[in-house]
Image (cartoon, rainbow, N blue to C red):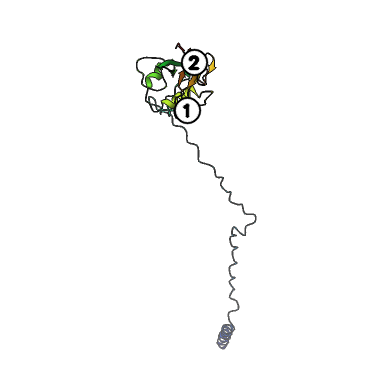
Amino acid sequence: MRLRLAGAAALVATCLAASACGSLDTPTVPEPAPQPSTPTASTQPNPSPTPTPVLSGPAPKPSPTPEPGATPDPQPTPSAPADSGGCGNPLPGPLAEVNVKIHQRGDNHWILDSTPLVGPDVTYCAKIGFTDGRGFCPVRVEGHPEREACELYVTGRARDTGRPGPTWSVDGSLCTGQPVCGNHPDNQYQAMAYKSGLYKACGKNDVCGSVTVDR
């Protein structure tokens, strides 16, 4: 009995000593190892650059296909050429004839008159107001504001005076004044005949008209 009590007392003393010195047998739990951080784009080796988009112009719009039976857009009316000098559409064709006649008979001289004609073009003549079916006509009706410009467009300027209108001659010689033939002082389309002869009025394309004067 004494031996059991002595053994128990020794065991209690051993336990108390172990408690005072700390638990030497308690295993130490290791701290978790730090996980490697995810590398950022700046720390990654040789990062792949983002490709720059290639900009291109807007895609061409396809021409619309007209629907069956649709009326096409009308074409713009061509404007008169720059050298028409104020003669608008419709433009006359080239000088075709020069109608020369005796305009007035006087004691001292006769006055001759010329009218440039274009044609044959019934459609053109009708468009500008000659609706009687004629094929040859003046460039505009009498009194039209474009008549002077259109006459210059087809006739040109006289070779001797430089004025708008035909070049006048008599028996092959230019009209230089008295005592034979002279250009009218105010109108190149008229001439003054002082003597008898064959008088001609010619345009820039050498188309002429003539009249015989017998004074």
Q: Secondary structure at mark 2?
A: strand
Viewer-nearest residue: 13 or 93? 93
Identified at 43% across, 26% down, the residue is: 148
Any mark on residue 200, and which? 2
The picture places residue 122, in percent across and down from the top left corner, at: 40, 16
Which picture quadrant has residue 9? bottom right
| Left-right relation of 191 to 26 | left
Gap between marks 1 and 2 measured at Cα: 25 Å
Three-letter amino acid code at disc 2? Lys
* Residue on which disc 1 sits: 84
Identified at 53% across, 41% down, the residue is: 57
The picture places residue 183, in percent across and down from the top left corner, at: 48, 22
Q: Is residue 70 above or below residue 35?
A: above
User: Could you tell which of marks 1 and 2 lies nearer the N-terminus?
Assistant: 1
Q: Quarter of the image containing the N terminus?
A: bottom right
Q: How many other residues sit within 10 Å of disc 1, few (<14), some (14-19) or many (≥20)?
A: some
Farthest-out residue, right: 46
Farthest-out residue, left: 132
Q: Secondary structure at mark 1?
A: helix
Viewer-nearest residue: 102 or 35? 102
Q: Nearer the viewer, mark 1 or mark 2?
A: 2
Which picture quadrant has residue 125? top left
